[in-house]
């Protein structure tokens, strides 16, 4: 089936739905200049991730991780939402949006105008740093500026170590966020996965939950995903183009 034929089907599915759940991954933000993680040129092809327990146990690993955050900040700081993000906002304006559940930490859904109460950022948001002891929050750019100057693992005023307010490898997800996400998967009448390889668990299990509850499942992604075989509709193409054609045109 040609891509535009699939887009026509998606457009019809959207028109018939009133409680749409979007599940988004790194692929929705690549057109905003933010590298993905598992694509052909993904970050994890060239860099080994620092695990949470390593970060806790070693100042050298703390410095390595903060260097990684510093290196990537140039992509995140000035990134702007693309038309895929705005297409989802349009769905909210039409009162058809149940929720946006994102694996992304870039904050672009909020910048585009998705309501905070409609958004679940499963893996956090990298605009802040959090104290591991007292949970105080800091602006990430202020923390990075000081780190760049002194090359010392950043600390809170209370003496506790800071980390970016994101979920690291080996760190558990927020149980309330995950519970809310599963509830949205059960309540939706259409689940659309956008730009995710659907291999990272437990986040990807949200999409599986929607399928288990017999909700129509649409997957939009360049390349294979973990759930292609169970999808009602799979569109292997640029996610921005597909959403623009499906929602605005």
Image (cartoon, rainbow, N blue to C red):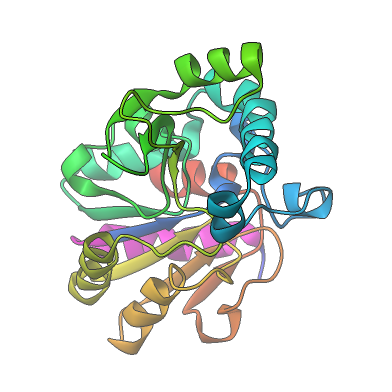
Left or right side of 84 for 184: left
Residue 160 locus on image (x, y percent): 38, 36
- Identify the residue shown where x is 17% and y is 72%: 187
Q: Is residue 48 magenta?
A: no
Residue 181 locus on image (x, y percent): 27, 65
Left or right side of 187 for 140: right
Give above or below for 164 relative to 168. Answer: above
- Whether residue 249 is visible here, answered yes or no, is no
- The part of the chain drawn in magenta is 3-20
Residue 127 locus on image (x, y percent): 42, 28
- Whether residue 105 is visible here, answered yes or no, is yes
- Return the residue nearer the eye: 93 or 15: 93
Left or right side of 79 for 63: right
- Identify the residue shown where x is 41% and y is 63%: 192
Q: Quadrant of the C terminus?
A: top left
Q: Is the magenta region chiefly helix, strand or loop? A: helix
- Identify the residue shown where x is 29% and y is 66%: 178
- Return the residue nearer the eye: 144 or 88: 144
Give above or below for 133 relative to 122. Answer: above
- Return the residue nearer the eye: 235 or 207: 207
Residue 12 image-quadrant placement: bottom left
């Amino acid at each position: 089936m040609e891509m535009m034929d699939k887009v026509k089907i998606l457009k019809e599915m959207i028109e018939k739905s009133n409680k749409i759940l979007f599940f988004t991954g790194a692929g929705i933000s690549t057109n905003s200049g933010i590298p993905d993680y598992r694509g052909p040129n993904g970050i994890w092809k060239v860099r080994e991730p620092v695990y949470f327990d390593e970060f806790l146990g070693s100042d050298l690993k703390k410095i390595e991780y903060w260097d990684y955050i510093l290196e990537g900040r140039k992509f995140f700081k000035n990134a702007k939402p693309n038309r895929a993000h705005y297409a989802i906002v349009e769905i909210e304006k039409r009162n058809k949006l149940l929720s946006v559940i994102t694996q992304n930490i870039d904050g672009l859904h909020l910048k585009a105008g998705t309501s905070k109460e409609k958004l679940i950022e499963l893996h956090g948001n990298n605009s802040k740093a959090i104290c591991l002891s007292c949970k105080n929050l800091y602006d990430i750019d202020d923390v990075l500026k000081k780190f760049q100057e002194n090359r010392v693992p950043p600390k809170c005023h209370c003496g506790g170590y800071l980390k970016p307010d994101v979920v690291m490898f080996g760190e558990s997800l927020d149980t309330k966020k995950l519970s809310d996400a599963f509830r949205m998967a059960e309540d939706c009448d259409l689940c659309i996965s956008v730009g995710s390889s659907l291999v990272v668990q437990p986040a990807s299990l949200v999409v599986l939950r929607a399928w288990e509850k017999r909700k129509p499942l649409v997957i939009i992604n360049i390349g294979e995903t973990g759930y292609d075989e169970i999808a009602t509709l799979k569109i292997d193409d640029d996610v921005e183009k597909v959403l623009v054609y499906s929602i605005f045109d």
